[in-house]
Amino acid sequence: MTPRELIPALADAVALLDQACDRSAAYARRDGGSTARVDRLGATCEPIQPRAGFTLCAWVGGRLVERSCDDLTASAVAHCAGELAERARSLGAVATVRSSAPSEPTVRHFAHPQRSDARLVPAADKIAAARALRAELDGAEHLREAIAIVGDSHAEIVHVDRAHRFSQELHR
C-alpha cells in the first residue's frame, strides 16, 4: 500500500490510541529515486534503495511512546496500534476529557509542482547529464578527479491525528 492508501487504517489506529491516552498521531512515508554517477572509470545509474514505514505515537504521562514498522499494510498498522495502546495502558496512561475535536478532520493533499517527472527520464539521459556535468569540471586547475552525480528522489508522506489527514508528495 502507499502511505495515502493507508490513511483510513492510520485514522483507526489514532482513534484506538486516543481511547488509551491524551494525544496520539501517525506518520507514514515511502521514499525512492535513482542516482546516475560518472567518474573516470565509467558510469552507472542505479535505483536508490526504497524505504517505507510508519510510526504511531502516543503521549503518555508527560512522555512520548512510539511504535514503528516498515510494513505498509492495514493489518500491520492495526497490530502495532494494539501493541502501543497496551503499552500506554501499562505505563499508566489514562485518556482525559479534552476539548472536542472537529466533527470532520481537515483533509489536505500537498504536491510539489514539477515540469517533468524525473522517474520517467531514461537512465541513458541521466548518465548523459552526469557526463555533461563532469565535462564542465574536466581540466580545472588543481582538480585530480571529478565525480558527477545526478539524482532524483521522491517521497510520499502522511500525517494523521484526531483533527488532520495530511498527505504530501515531494519530487526532487
Image (tube, rainbow, N blue to C red):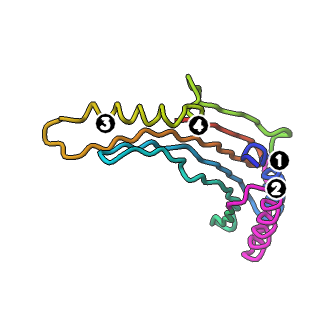
Q: Residue at x 65, y 42 (%)?
A: 156
Magenta region includes residue 156? no
- Would residue 122 be found to the left or right of residue 136 on screen? right
Mark found first going from the N terminus, 2 or 3? 2
Mark found first going from the N terminus, 1 or 3? 1
Question: Label 2, on which residue?
Answer: 74
Rendered position, 4 above or below 66:
above
Q: Amino acid at mark 1?
A: Pro
Position of residue 135 measured from the top left corner of the image (x, y, whole percent): 28, 32
Mark found first going from the N terminus, 1 or 4? 1
Magenta region includes residue 97? yes
Question: Label 3, on which residue?
Answer: 134
Position of residue 114 measured from the top left corner of the image (x, y, whole percent): 57, 26
Rendered position, 149 above or below 16:
above
Mark found first going from the N terminus, 2 or 4? 2
Q: CA distance from mark 2 to mark 4?
A: 23 Å
Quarter occupied by residue 44? top left
Q: Which residues are magenta?
A: 70-99
Q: Are marks 1 and 2 in contact (CB under 8 Å)?
A: yes
Tag in front: 1 or 2:
2
Q: Are marks 2 and 4 in contact (CB under 8 Å)?
A: no
Q: CA distance from mark 1 to mark 4?
A: 21 Å
- Would residue 16 be found to the left or right of residue 66 on screen? right
Q: Amino acid at mark 4?
A: Leu
- Would residue 9 be found to the left or right of residue 47 on screen? right
Position of residue 151 measured from the top left corner of the image (x, y, whole percent): 47, 40
Mark found first going from the N terminus, 3 or 4? 3
